[in-house]
Image (tube, rainbow, N blue to C red):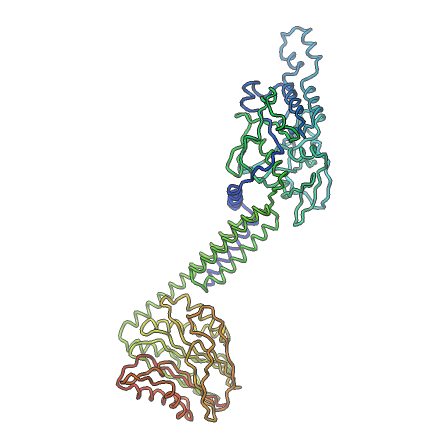
Amino acid sequence: MRRYRLAAGGLLLLAGAAMVAAPAPVQLLRNAVFDSYQRLFPRERREAPAIIVEIDEKSLAAMGQWPWPRTRVADLIDRIQLHRPAVIGIDLLFSEPDRFSPARLAEALPVMPTEMAEKLVALPTTDHLLAQAFARSNVVLGVAGMPAVDARFPYPPRAAPMDWQTQRPMDRLLRYAGHLQSLPELERAARGRGLISNDAPDGVVRRALLLARVGESIVPSLGLDMLRVASGGNIAIVDRRFGGFGVSLAGLEIPLQADGTVWLRTARHDPHRFVSALDVLNGKVDGTRIANKLVLIGITGLGLQDFRLTALGENVPGVEIHAQLIEQLFEDRDLSRPRAMLWLEVALLLAGGVAVIAWSPRFRVQRVWAAASAAFLIVVLGGLGSFLWAGVLVDGAWIGLGWFGALAIMQAGTLAASDRMQRELRETAARMEGELDAGKRIQMGLLPNPSNLFGGDQRFAIAAALTPARTVGGDFYECFWLDSHRVFFAVADVSGKGLPAALFMAASKSHLKSAVLLSNGNLPAMLGAMESELARENPEQLFITFFAAVLDVLSGTLTTINAGHDAPLLARADGTLTALERASGPPLGVTEGFAYTAETRTLARGDKLLVFTDGVTEAVDARGAFFGAERMRDVFAKSCAGKPYEIVQAMDDAVKQFSAGTEAADDVTLLCLEWRE
């Protein structure tokens, strides 16, 4: 079994290392767990702080293909501003001069009369007109992070001021070497700028960028800077109570991952988040939908932007991700996954796995699998509860995989051990299918010969005898040295008769010696070990009455334990005869896990102890009368002055004489001990 324990332990360590390192398979499963939370309980849209003015298919069909002239964009900004929004965030880039500017048109049409061309060149650019529209409104422009520096924008973007209230290093923030932004004239007219990048390695947007490093600047996301401009406050970087850092703004505290992202608590796609740009330009929009709102302008026309897949499995326009993040922040429905949660999961994996390794060999397969399944269900429900009520993401999948993987290995070991034992039992049964006399000889051959073991010792004497019934049975006795001055002896009786009892006796006796030696003579521990082993290989639900004792031959100290066995008789040197009535507990196999206790007494010189099985008291004569306890006491009282082997012989003769003419229905087992020191 050792190799199976090592294999199960290795599997647990490997699973724990995988949870920490999070390679692609682990992350894939972890994301599937987190997505399942969101799909079971998507965020309900309680508030509508953000509205999206979308340049949709309808707008493009009426106003022409994108890009529109900057004058039309300026008109859109002015018409939105008429309804007094809190802020306007533009999820678009104006990195190149407008090709519809008067000077650009004059340059593009060389056939134009010189006088007309000069007048066009003298007119203000459409970019300037758009900048003026920006200046009349609270506009936050988008910035796109790039993996390399763009020659047009060699310097980092101008970022919003931040209050640093943390000493934690922010070296794990996502980094962009370069960026794209709008033209400098437009940038100067804007009240803020924020990142519109939202990287999703596997194509599913589960986290939204809130802070990132662009060159040497730390830049907020578009939604975060819109909140800053709308509230008039400053972005503060603060420490979180349980580790990590967060962003504080306008009374909100937002937990951040180490890379500057925030987990999205995703809601369903909702058309009510959107207003068509065409309706705004035509004055057909309800102004209350825009008033005091955080307005996002973005393109949703098919073919002009990529849709983003959310954790709910929906493809939504990228601009809607910004709107959902703003809603989440307003509703204070944050999600987080603290670093400490990972270590808690690893601890649960290892603790549960150790329990599986330690307990699975001791209990039945059904009970172990039921317990493991119940524990895993608790983890799953705990994960759901932490998601719903604390906004904390818990990954229970790898915990379950580790537990059940270790359990499968341990069960394989148990099945292998059971199969090995079953083969041994089948071989034993095959040998016992022959003549009953051969079976009896085998049974008797399993028993020790006390005279050979202890015959030369003058400090004590032990004699034992087992007279089998007409069939092989379940009685046995055992005796051997524990160490130089302690002797162990035991008498047991398996319930039932015939071959099943004999096989169970053989199995019990094979477990006994190892249990005694492993417990170093600790009798309750020995019984507990036997109980666990026998429970796994007891399909017939047999039980064993069991009496065991340890004698210290130097002091005469006798420690006994009794599992439902007939009370032994103690003959004192002065002739007093008493029964050791107190039993430590029920027979082995009746009550699993019972805590047995031992008793200790001191023998005097010449005291004798007689241990027997119920084959003695339940022997019957030709009339059906029982030998009985009183008759046995009388025989012991008359013979107790003799040596142990004489007492055993006298008792055996008395039983045979009483039951003469009848076949014995049960084995007769006797063991007598005398302390002489």
| Above/below status of 596 relative to 174 | below
Q: Nearer the viewer, residue 214 or 634?
A: 634
Q: Can see residue 126? A: yes
Q: Quadrant of residue 261?
A: top right
Q: Position of residue 19 (x, y in %)?
A: 55, 49
Q: Position of residue 339 (x, y in %)?
A: 61, 48
The residue lying at 49 percent from left, 59 percent from top is 356
For the N terminus, the image quarter is bottom left
Q: Nearer the viewer, residue 129 or 275?
A: 275
Query: In the image, is 516 to the left or to the right of 98?
Result: left
Q: Position of residue 8 (x, y in %)?
A: 48, 57
Q: Quadrant of residue 489?
A: bottom left
Q: Quadrant of residue 160?
A: top right
Q: Nearer the viewer, residue 134 or 127?
A: 134
The residue lying at 39 percent from left, 90 percent from top is 634
Q: Position of residue 394 (x, y in %)?
A: 56, 48
